[in-house]
Amino acid sequence: MDQRKRLSFFRKLLSSWISLLILSLIALAFFIIGEVLHNNLLQGLAGVLGGAALSLAITNITSREAVLQQNAKEANIARKDTYYIPVFNELKQIYDILGEAKQKRLPYPQWISGLGDKQFHMMVWHKYPMPSFKNWVTFKEEPYRGNFTEKACKLFDEVQKSGADYNQAVSEAKDPVTTILNTKIDTAFREWAKTDDFKHWKEETNGGGTWSAAQYHGWNAYIYQYMQRPSSTTPEAQALVWAYNILGWVLANDIDKASGAIQKTYENDFQARVTPDTAWFKSILESVWPELQELPHVKKVHEVATDLFAKTVQAKDYVQSRLTYIRDNYEGGEPPL
């Protein structure tokens, strides 16, 4: 019911209540006079007017209840679209991504946006969906919070806290994983530079200064540039672990997908063109994989991820039940098709 119609209705309702008051007073006057004068006609009129007043009162009350129910319907449908569905969509996104990670179909997310973001975190999660929980951070504050029950607020607050714990745990796992992996990558690159094929390529191209038809020309050029870097340069593994989320595959405990992701990163993003095959990169990871899985930081991520998943399921299922309630009570029930 729009504002104009609502205003018109309340004007009519006010007029009706005034009429009811006047009618009741007239009925009372007739009754009193009839009693005093022992006039049956006046008493009869008082009864008729009293009945009319009662009927009008019932009509007014019924109309008011109808308006209240209509307002409740409109308010809950508006809440559904403005508040409930946005929160539900983010809960489902977290649920889906964590569920896919548990099944090793996606790497674990290394950040949930909206829970204490820092600027550099906006650049991570390369080529993978980054879940978010931004809406509740806004809706939990008044006056928006009043659109949710206390049960819902508690469930969403728990998801928010668990999500923040998850972000912290993943961030704290980054450096230990980078440190372990970087040593092995550095060793593998230096061993590659010692091969006869690399030395021959280096002489033939003057360190990549001229083009070569060699299979690994682009890769050799990358290795050559790597060997020239000063010792203070950012660890080679850092970009892989963080910006390209190899950390996510470490957390998912999937060495094959981690190896493939590293190989594709050098081939496509680092523009090394033809690179060693996935098995070469897997041999690097195999030498440190058990150590990575036993890191306390990695185990901590698994612990908080399990907690976050459980709390997300509880919150998501509760919102789904309330959305079903709105559909059944205010939107005509189950769809016929």
Image (tube, rainbow, N blue to C red):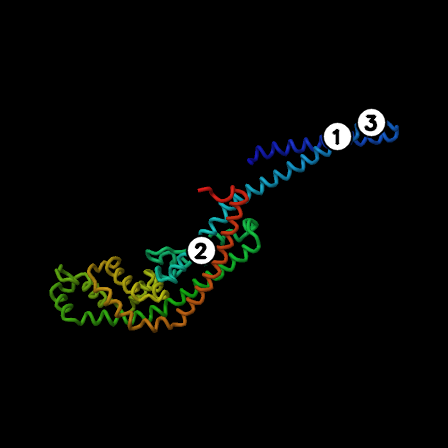
Q: Secondary structure at mark 1?
A: helix
Work out which residue is located at the far front of the displayed protein and give it: 336
Work out which residue is located at the far top of the displayed protein and give it: 41
Q: Secondary structure at mark 3?
A: helix
Disc 2 crowd, CA 10 A, few/some/many (<14, 14-19, 20+): some
Identify which residue, 108 or 172, lies in the foreground: 108
Inter-mark Cα distance, 3 to 2: 75 Å
- The x and y percentages for residue 11 are 64, 32
- Looking at the image, do the residues carrying marks 3 and 1 touch, with CB atoms under 8 Å apart? no
Residue type marked 3? Leu
Residue type marked 1? Leu
Among numbered discs 3 and 2, the one appearing first in the sequence: 3
**Which image quadrant for residue 118?**
bottom left
Residue 42: which disc? 3
Left or right, residue 218 beside residue 81? left
Q: Quadrant of the N terminus?
A: top right
